């Protein structure tokens, strides 16, 4: 029986890995620095590459640095295969399977990912670590790229984005960084403080509004979140905003009341501006591994998630969760968080991400 059909062993490896997932911590209000202003361009040299190329190269290097923990998990065993072995065997492929699960790619994802690789090994088309890396890269891209091929945002004014997620994933902070990102693009942005139940949530969002220089709509504490959303969307339309980002409560995703509250907010948005919210983005913590996939499925079933933001990617060895999410759900990853500053929230690029893993 081929290695990738041995699901029982793989599931045990995954379960052992899930038990190591750290608990989520509630986000704190941090006096972070405002998004860094671009430095003045240095005098252009004759053979200097375009500024955009230098910027992309800089981001690629940063992404590679932030994914160092995941890369070490993946690459070390691959090199080890060829130190002691002259060819790949079924045992070494099983070891590779466990390695991928350790990086939180999930059992089903790993089985589908490794099937074409096993076929190439059997045909002697993969004989060294360089060829194995190339095969893994191609297989991962084949899983990720289709989900991200047509991910343009709707051409709406205002574009209403409802942001959801459980407490502790960095949802409110992510909204502040999104505001900075959109404003940097020249957009007029309004934040809506719809998380009226969590202590300091509204104040935290106000700090981000002041820091990024965008408008905010808020009500008193413990106000009806749906009413706040309705007024926020109406105000944004009246003031000619380009983008509206609505914060929401984030109690445990297993509570029916939370999902019903989110559905109510969606209905209020639609009453205020038919067709809105145009996007519903789920914020998830990369450190939670396969638990993040479970969260995503529950939210998606309840309210229809259209995009995801993956936070805390820089502090985890579980970067493989990106591959698992794209495999299990037909929902694009919009942004990934690589650090604390506003500019560390970057648009997700499939090829750049996979390249940084190896």
Image: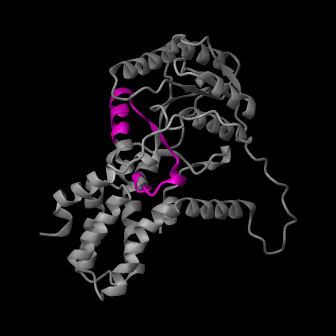
The residue under the point 66% across, 43% down is 342
The residue under the point 82% across, 54% down is 39
Q: Residue 309 in magenta?
A: yes
Image position of 279 (left or right of 33): left
Vertical side of 30 occupied by 75: above or below:
below
The residue under the point 30% across, 89% down is 86
Which segment is the magenta one?
Answer: 294-321
Q: Is residue 330 visible?
A: no
Vertical side of 168 occupied by 337: above or below:
below
The percent coordinates of residue 57 (x first, y second) are 65, 65
Vertical side of 255 occupied by 268: above or below:
above
Vertical side of 32 occupied by 218: above or below:
above
Q: Residue 111 in magenta?
A: no
The percent coordinates of residue 157 (x first, y second) are 62, 27
User: Where is residue 214, by image quadrant?
Assistant: top right
The residue under the point 58% across, 37% down is 174
The percent coordinates of residue 128 (x first, y second) are 37, 83
Give the tally of numbered discs: 0
Image position of 34 (left or right of 282): right
Q: Quadrant of the N terminus?
A: bottom left
User: Where is residue 245, by image quadrant?
Assistant: top right
Image position of 342 (left or right of 24): right
Q: Is residue 113 visible?
A: yes
């Amino acid at each position: 029986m081929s290695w990738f059909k041995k699901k029982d062993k793989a599931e045990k490896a995954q379960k052992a890995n899930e038990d190591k997932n750290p608990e989520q911590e509630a986000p704190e209000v941090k006096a972070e620095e405002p998004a860094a202003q671009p430095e003045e361009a240095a005098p252009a040299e004759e053979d200097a590459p375009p500024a955009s190329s230098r910027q992309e190269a800089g981001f690629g290097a940063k992404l590679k640095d932030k994914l160092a923990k995941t890369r070490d998990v993946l690459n070390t065993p691959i090199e080890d295969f060829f130190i002691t072995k002259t060819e790949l065997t079924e045992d070494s492929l099983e070891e590779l399977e466990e390695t991928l699960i350790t990086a939180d790619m999930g059992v089903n994802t790993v089985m589908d990912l490794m099937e074409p690789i096993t076929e190439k090994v059997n045909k002697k088309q993969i004989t060294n670590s360089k060829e194995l890396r190339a095969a893994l890269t191609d297989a991962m891209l084949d899983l990720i790229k289709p989900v991200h091929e047509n991910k343009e945002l709707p051409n709406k004014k205002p574009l209403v984005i409802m942001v959801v997620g459980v407490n502790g994933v960095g949802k409110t902070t992510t909204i502040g960084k999104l505001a900075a990102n959109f404003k940097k693009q020249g957009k007029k942005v309004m934040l809506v403080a719809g998380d009226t139940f969590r202590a300091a949530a509204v104040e935290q969002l106000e700090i981000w509004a002041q820091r990024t220089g965008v408008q905010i709509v808020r009500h008193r504490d413990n106000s009806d979140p749906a009413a706040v959303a309705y007024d926020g969307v109406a105000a944004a339309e009246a003031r000619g905003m380009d983008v509206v980002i609505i914060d929401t409560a984030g109690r445990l995703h297993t509570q029916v009341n939370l999902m019903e509250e989110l559905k109510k907010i969606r209905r209020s948005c639609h009453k205020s501006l038919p067709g809105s919210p145009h996007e519903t983005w789920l914020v998830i913590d990369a450190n939670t591994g396969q638990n993040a996939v479970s969260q995503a499925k529950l939210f998606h079933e309840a309210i229809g998630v259209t995009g995801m933001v993956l936070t805390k990617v820089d502090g985890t060895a579980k970067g493989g969760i990106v591959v698992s999410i794209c495999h299990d759900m037909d929902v694009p990853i919009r942004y990934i968080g690589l650090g604390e500053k506003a500019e560390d929230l970057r648009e997700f690029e499939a090829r750049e991400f996979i390249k940084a893993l190896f």
